[in-house]
Image (spheres, helix red, strand yellow):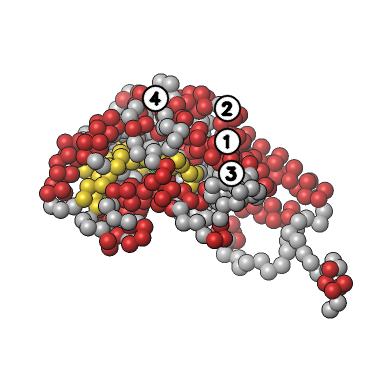
Amino acid sequence: MSRQDDLAESPQEETLDPEDWNETRRVSRQVVDDAVAYLRDVRERPVWREMPADVRAAFEEPAPRGPMPLPDVYREVAERVLPYPMGNIHPRFWAWYMGSSNFTGALADFLAAVQGSNLGGGNHAAARLDQQVVAWCKEMIGFPPSASGTLVSGGSMANMIALIVARNVKAGVDVGEHGVAALGAPLRFYGSDQMHNCHRKAMQAIGLGNQSLRRIPSRPDLRIDIEELGAAIARDRADGFRPAGLIANAGTVNTGAIDDLPALADLAAREGLWLHVDGCIGALIAVAPQNAYRVRGLERADSIALDPHKWLHAPFEVGCVLVRDAAAHRASFSMTQEYLEQAPRGLAAAEWLYEYGLQTSRGFRALKVWMALKQHGVEKFGRLIDQNIAQARHLDALIAAEPLLESVAPTTINIVCFRFRLPDLDEAGLKRLNVEIMIRLQEEGVAVVSDTTVHGRHCLRVAINNHRTRRSDLNLLVQEIVRLGRKIAAPG
Ligand SMILES: Cc1ncc(COP(=O)(O)O)c(C=O)c1O
């Protein structure tokens, strides 16, 4: 082949770009129009519904070898995926703990993908914006600007990043270099028995193991028992362990209980322990005018995990970890390679953001947080948090007024634990009955709630982390639970 041939355009060369941009515009407009209608009408649809057999079967199809026109691909999504969502954007979804998304965030995800930037770092606008969102997170919860932070997939990863830094700082040896085998004494971390299971996962993943995580009993109000905690630390020291860190809950996953953060900060300071706050549920209460006092003390932490895909309602996924000691944070993950050196000017003339976490390539998840905060302002998110907490109080009042329902745990913030009760049913019978109520609520598409067990008592759990919920939705929930409970329990 001559050099001339080499330089000529080859008809065989391909691209993923559309052949017909006008057609692309037409399909895109259709997608956006449908998406707006989808969200506008969400209340009219069931919260959840079972997929029919043909839809399930479609997900067994092998990988397509050849092309399909984009309108047909979209039709498949419109027919098989969009009608069968998890349901968390619906006003009557209150299961587990998740946000209810927002349209601006969805537009942001689209734009982020169109721009396509990799947030591993670099000198470009997306990377600056990512750092601005981290700075806004610090500002919202009262953490110093000198702290570091990074956006990650969610709370589990945010907690794990923090625990890696805590382990490295408190290990007394260079764990990064020599591994946990070099630890002189086994490390111990402490949290209440209400901790989220991501902490166990993290302990296992970072080589310390589940046993290194001490579960301290919670009191009847589901907050950590600080006397028991102090005693456990003393016992461990006497037994040759190395107490390393406290994991405080700013909103437990079961009931939303908030540990006594100032007391834990005092204890951590006295004992020389790292204080990590799992604020995935509650850290952002710091921006809610009526309830911010509940998380006071948060700002004294060494590290905090928070979750913009919960109370900022960013579309999944986005979590955030903040670390007071930026140098310690960077030291845990920084390992510059010859192929990723910083340059004095140009695209590589910026700190690499991948040096604050486990990922190298990172998505532009910051944009969905940034755009929604710009559009609505922090104050509105604060009011929405207050609104959800007030709605939980409303639900509490409905439960108190209904003899067939009983509260199972105190409501601190937006999580309400209660059950349908009948005097002649034992615990096992009550659990069977309440699980059946929960499933029928889902199957009838009325509402989605989840269940849990608090201090040995099974209950329904309503986590109102939803900017679409109205009090009338909660009125309907109570009415339906009572109707279903009576119907299921009726003889025959
Ligand atoms: C208290 C708490 N911590 C951590 C997590 C894990 O967060 P994610 O699901 O974003 O990984 C959750 C999730 O609900 C949580 O409630």
Which image quarter has ligand 1?
Answer: top left
The C terminus lies in which quarter of the figure?
A: top left
- Write the residue at 15% across / 48% down: 237
Which tag is nearer the camera, tag 4 or tag 3? 3
- Badge 1 marks a residue whose secondary structure is helix
Question: What is the number of the mark on residue 292?
Answer: 4
Measured as percent of width and height from the top left, residue 434 is found at 33, 42
The label number, if any, that marks residue 376 in the structure image: 2
Which mark, by number, is residue 127? 3
Position of residue 236 measured from the top left corner of the image (x, y, whole percent): 16, 49
Helix, strand or loop under label 3: helix
Considering only order in the chain, which callout, 2 or 3, is on the residue closer to the N terminus? 3
Dot 1: within a 10 Å radius of its alpha carbon, few (fewer than 14), some, or many (20 or more) residues?
A: many
Q: Are marks 1 and 4 in contact (CB under 8 Å)?
A: no
Considering only order in the chain, which callout, 4 or 2, is on the residue closer to the N terminus? 4
Q: Residues within 10 Å of mark 3 (few under 14, many from 20)?
A: many
Cβ–Cβ under 8 Å for marks 3 and 2: no
Residue flagged by tag 2: what amino acid is it? His
Mark identifier at residue 30: none
- 425 lies left or right of 492: left
